[in-house]
Each structure stands twice: as C-alpha cells, then as structure tokens.
Image: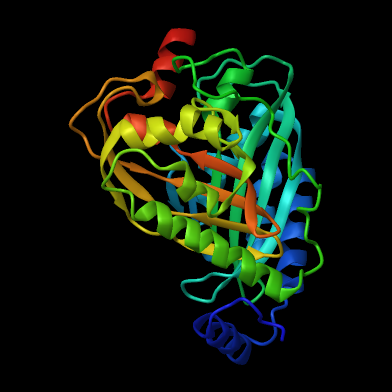
Amino acid sequence: MLYVNITIKEYVFTRKIKEEMGMSNFQEEKKLVLKYFDEMENAGYEDVKGVMEKYMTPEYNFKGVYPFREQEGIENAAEVFFIPLKKALSSMQRRQDIFIGGFNEFDHSKWVMSMGHFMGLFDQDWLGIPHTRKMISLRYAEFNCVENGKITKTGLFVDIIGFMQQAGVNPMPPQTGNYFVYPGPRNHNGLLFEDAPEEEGVKTLKLVNKMVDDLDKLNNTMGCPPEILEKSWSKNMIWYGPGGIGASYTIPRYQEQHQLPFRNRLTDKKFNGHVCRFAEGNFACFFGWPNLTNRPLGGFLGMPGGQVKADMQVVDVYCREGDKLSENWVLIDLPYWLKQQGLDILERTQQIYNA
C-alpha cells in the first residue's frame, strides 16, 4: 500500500485534500515563486514595487521580524523591507538551500517555502548597522501563499543578529552555541523544484508533529530527558539556531547549549500555534505569529530575568533522514522578544554608531 505507516485519520485527511484540490501538484505555485525571485533579484530598488505588483495581490499581507513586523499592501511592504534591503546590499543574490511546496495543514491553502541566505556587498547602512563594503550574508526563511496565480501572503524571517555579528557589531553577550554562515542539508537535496512523492511528505510531517507534541507536554516542567528527543531525533542531529544562540551538534550538546537553557530559564510558557505548517519529501517547515509566549527567569541569552511575558515569532525548517529528524534550521525574532522587555538592540546600536 502507498500509505503504509500512517494512520487512518491521516489517510482520510490526504484523500480529502486530493478530492477537494486535486492531486498534490505544486508546479504552478513553485514556478510562479521562482519567477518572482528571479525578477526581484534582477530588479533595481526603484523597480521593486513594479515587480511586486506583477506577482502580488493588492490585498497582499507581509509578516516579518522586528522592526518590519506586519505590513498591509504592496507599497508598505516594499517601502519598509524590500527597498531598504536592496539599497543596502549591492548586487544582492538569493542563495537557496531548501525550496518546497505543500498544503498548509490548517486550511489546505498552497504555500511555497524558500530558505537560505541573501548575499551581497554591504554598501549602505541598514537598520543603523554601519556598512562594511564587504561581502555579507543575511539568513532568511520565506513562506509565500499562492492563490489563483498570485502571492497573497508572505512570512519572511531574517536573522538580524547574525547579520550584525558578521558586520562586527554584536549586540549580545557570548552565545552558548556557535554562529556562522550555515550550510544547507548535508545531502544537498533540499531544492525540490520537481514535486516529491506525496507519501514522503506525509511521513515527515507525522514525525515533526509527534516531536512537537512530545515537547509541548513538557512545557510546564523544567528540563527534558534525552530519551524524549531520541524518539524523533538522530543522535547526530544538528540544530542551526539564530544569532545570539548559535548552532549545536549532537543531542547532548544541543541540550547543553540551547534546549536546557531555553527550558529552564524561561517560565510561564504557552504554545500559541502556527500560521502555516507543511512538508514535502524529507523536509518540513512552520512559522507562528507568535508561536510562543514566555517570561525570562534570568540567564537565557545571558540576560537578566523580568516580569514581562513576551511573544516569540519562530521559524523551524526540518530535514528527515529515514525515521529520524537530522537537521533543524531555526530563526527566532529575538530583537522583538527583547524589545518587549525594554531592550531595543537596534535602537541602541544606532545610538552608539550613529551618534
């Protein structure tokens, strides 16, 4: 049988999608998004709005990290995010590591996700960060919802702290992991320009959901027994965290360098859900708005505790090998999480370097 190892509920869900929306085929959506990427890369900053008007609906909604946040309409999104970035990074390229499409688990809408780096020459100040005239990479994950041949919604997360570190302006205390320009999947198989077998995506999403459920059950407790992680993760897992936290390799080091500080130094944890979650082939992804709410006890990110409950916007991208998750790329809007608690690292950086 095609759907060995999945539940009857999952089988019915998959059949329902097929009946309502046809066989799982994301070629039109992928080609549209790739054309948009190509035209945007080759456009000057003065042409950005024209490119967006070609591919987006007038009611376009943009969700991004702080300070961009949520923008309604093409003009606002262009003026707040896309144009300033194009001005700052000369000859900017989009260098993709993962590219997948799928049905959103929550409303069956079609989404395309791209993850990688924007690379260019840092020739103009950006967000108050002094330019270097040197090559730089801005890590990103971009989710685009495609309906009736147009992009209607975008969730675009970038790693601003990682960018600042490359520019020599680190706003954070020493991090527990190690930040660098992260690679894509070990097997270099993340660019799914052709649709992957549907059953592989079902397996991947099932494994991710099981992992999320296992960890969600621990939200009111401290710590995490390693055997809980071993249910879903390869012993040689790699966790690529945001600037300010960094990356970790193997379950013991991941627990030491991120998971336990996260679990033990944050309290009042609440899971708020996801905007979009889907899988294709061996890859899965999701983002929330916000995913989590929590309060710092002191020690997480090397920062003091406080009484403010703060929201976390998070992107997770996963790679499955066999029956275990092997790699996880994570972006967290840490500048926004800190701002809610009274520390605006971008404002502080601007005051110091542009006084």
Image position of 123 (left or right of 177): right
Front one among 53 and 223: 223
Q: Of all residues shown, which one is farthest toward the left?
A: 307
In this rendering, the count of numbered labels is 0
Q: Of all residues shown, which one is farthest toward the bottom?
A: 19
Q: Residue at x 39, y 30 (%)?
A: 261
Image position of 352 (left or right of 280): left
* Up/down of 218 relative to 283, above or below: above
Q: Quadrant of residue 123?
A: top right
Instruction: Name the spot of residue 4 as percent of width and height, x first.
Output: 66, 80
Front one among 39 and 50: 39
* Up/down of 333 relative to 233, above or below: above
Instruction: Name the spot of residue 319 as percent of width and height, x first.
Output: 66, 52
Q: Residue at x 49, y 56 (%)?
A: 211
Residue 153 visible in the displayed image: no
Image position of 91 (left or right of 22): right
Instruction: Name the spot of residue 172 as percent of width and height, x first.
Output: 45, 18
Quadrant of the frame with the C terminus: top left
Instruction: Name the spot of residue 148 as percent of width and height, x first.
Output: 63, 77
Image position of 24 (left or right of 255): right
* Up/down of 339 relative to 192, above or below: above
Front one among 312 and 196: 196
Q: Quadrant of residue 312?
A: top left
Residue 159 visible in the displayed image: yes
Q: Residue at x 48, y 15 (%)?
A: 174
Quadrant of the frame with the N terminus: bottom right
Q: Quadrant of residue 117?
A: top right
